[in-house]
Amino acid sequence: MAQTRRKRTRKHRGTPAGTIERAGRTGRPQTRADAKQISRQRRTERLDRPPTWKGAMQRAAIAAVVFGAFVVILFGRGVAQAAVLVVFMFLLYIPLGYATDNMIYRFRQRRKQAR
């Protein structure tokens, strides 16, 4: 016998309170215009935050590890020699990254004040 009811194609997610939410629609903006507005707002909030030393350290760590991998792979140096260079570059990248972030932040703030 043929099936009379269509099977659902998406899973439903139940909560402890007993309500059922359909996957994919929770917290998503209803229209494309709403999504664009939320995206712009989040971007301006992110760019208006002052730079932090923690962010500079995280970026420096990533850059130093990538630099170390290039030293080992491209230049054929030993891992111990690359590790020394990684530590040196990490210590160099932290203040350089913070200063660059701070300069860009101040530039954006001055431009925002001028408007």
Image (cartoon, helix red, strand yellow):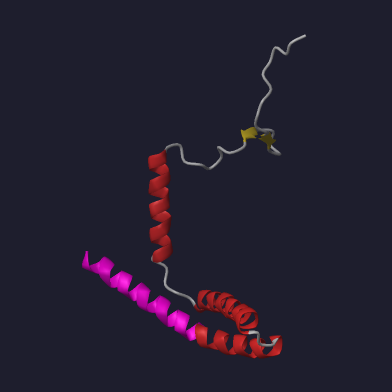
Farthest residue in the top direction? Answer: 1
| Residue at 60% from the left image edge and 80% from the top image edge | 74
Magenta part of the protein: which range?
94-115
Residue 2, compared with residue 64, is above or below; it is above
Residue 29, compared with residue 100, is above or below; it is above
Quarter of the figure with residue 98 = bottom left
Residue 64, compared with residue 8, is above or below; it is below
Farthest residue in the right direction? Answer: 1
Quarter of the figure with residue 31 = top left
Quadrant where the N terminus is found in the figure = top right
**For this rendering, which residue is in front, 103 or 17?**
103
**For this rendering, which residue is in front, 5 or 45?**
5
Residue 99, compared with residue 36, is above or below; it is below
Where does residue 93 sit, x and y in percent of width and height? 51, 83
How many numbered discs sit on the rendered protein? 0
Where does residue 38 sit, x and y in percent of width and height? 42, 49
Q: Main secondary structure of the magenta part?
A: helix
Q: Judge whether residue 45 is colored magenta.
A: no
Where does residue 61 sit, x and y in percent of width and height? 58, 78
Where does residue 104 sit, x and y in percent of width and height? 36, 74
Q: Judge whether residue 95 is colored magenta.
A: yes
| Residue at 51% from the left image edge and 79% from the top image edge | 53
Position of 55 compared to 87: left or right? left
Quadrant where the C terminus is found in the figure = bottom left
**For this rendering, which residue is in front, 65 or 77?**
77
Position of 99 compared to 86: left or right? left
| Residue at 40% from the left image edge and 42% from the top image edge | 34
| Residue at 41% from the left image edge and 40% from the top image edge | 32
